[in-house]
Amino acid sequence: MSEGVSFEARVVLRPRSIDEVLDLALAYTRIYRRDLLRVALFLVVPALALIVGLHRWLELDWWRTWAVALVLAPLIERATIAYAGRHLFGNQPRLRSGLAQGFRRPILALVAAVLIPLPWVPMLLTAFDEGVWVGLSVLVLVFWPFALAWSLYFSVVVVLEGLSLGPALKRAGVLISYRFGRALGFVALSAFLRVLFAVVAELGAGFVVSFLLQLGSPLDTLWENGGSWASIGGFLLAAPFVALARLFDYVDARTRLEGWDIQVRFKAIATRAKEERARSLAA
């Protein structure tokens, strides 16, 4: 963060358990729903449109369509973190500037977006028909949650602290080193939330289409062909919420390890004093 940027946090910076972090993310979403809804729509709608376009243009089946969705979700999270990181401290960043901050290193962002869902992508691209790829993916999947937990704050560090690849990996490792078990729990919980969002969206669409409109059940499409636009849309909508929760968990890590709440408080006091001096000189 640079000079001229507010350090007045919109929430109380204190240590929180993982369930309190999720409660805080829910409360923050409710209170600032207008700002966060704009961000979600700004990111999710183009991503969904891109998936629909690729699905129709390349004639992808649902399994390959899901592979595209899994790669785009980390990009949505990255941009959300860039916006929410400034919004958290009383700033009101523009959507375009937040997006630009999230993708200052586009190659690194794309590589990370492919690596995060890596065990699932080969299985989806082969529609679970290639035994070799399925076997290799399952083998990697056994160890992948540990890798995701170790790199949980990597994108947050890159986006908000502006570090390059090597320093960012080291920094993320330091923040995780004393709370690896909690990081594993967060990875499992975030996976559950993504599935929950997709299922709820599919059930909601099923209620509207089959009960209200009497047009048949879209659940048949989900289970027979591997997906539906409602479930993919719900999966993408989970990304901004998971990103917000990860941001608050990162804040908790820095608060516990570095006393960040005290640092931010002193920075806020110093910023206010500087602004008051500037106003007195201008008067």
Image (tube, rainbow, N blue to C red):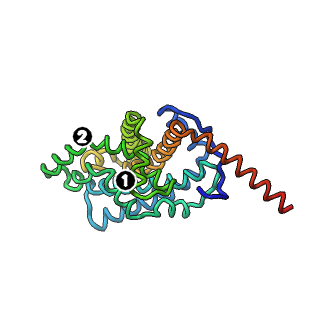
Mark in the foreground, 1 or 2: 2
Q: Residue 28, located in which quarter of the rendered image? A: top right
The residue under the point 27% across, 45% down is: 223
Seen as rendered, the residue at the extreme bottom is: 57
- Residue 37 picture location, percent across and down: 55, 51
The N terminus, quarter of image = bottom right
Which amino acid type is marked by label 1? Trp
The residue under the point 40% across, 53% down is: 74
From the viewer's perspective, is 190 left or right of 264? left
- Tell how many labels: 2
Q: Nearer the viewer, residue 17 or 49?
A: 17
Is residue 93 visible in the rendered image? The answer is yes
Which amino acid type is marked by label 2? Val
Seen as rendered, the residue at the extreme left is: 131
Residue where numbered disc 2 is placed: 142
Mark 1, other Cα within 10 Å: few <14 / some 14–19 / many ≥20: many
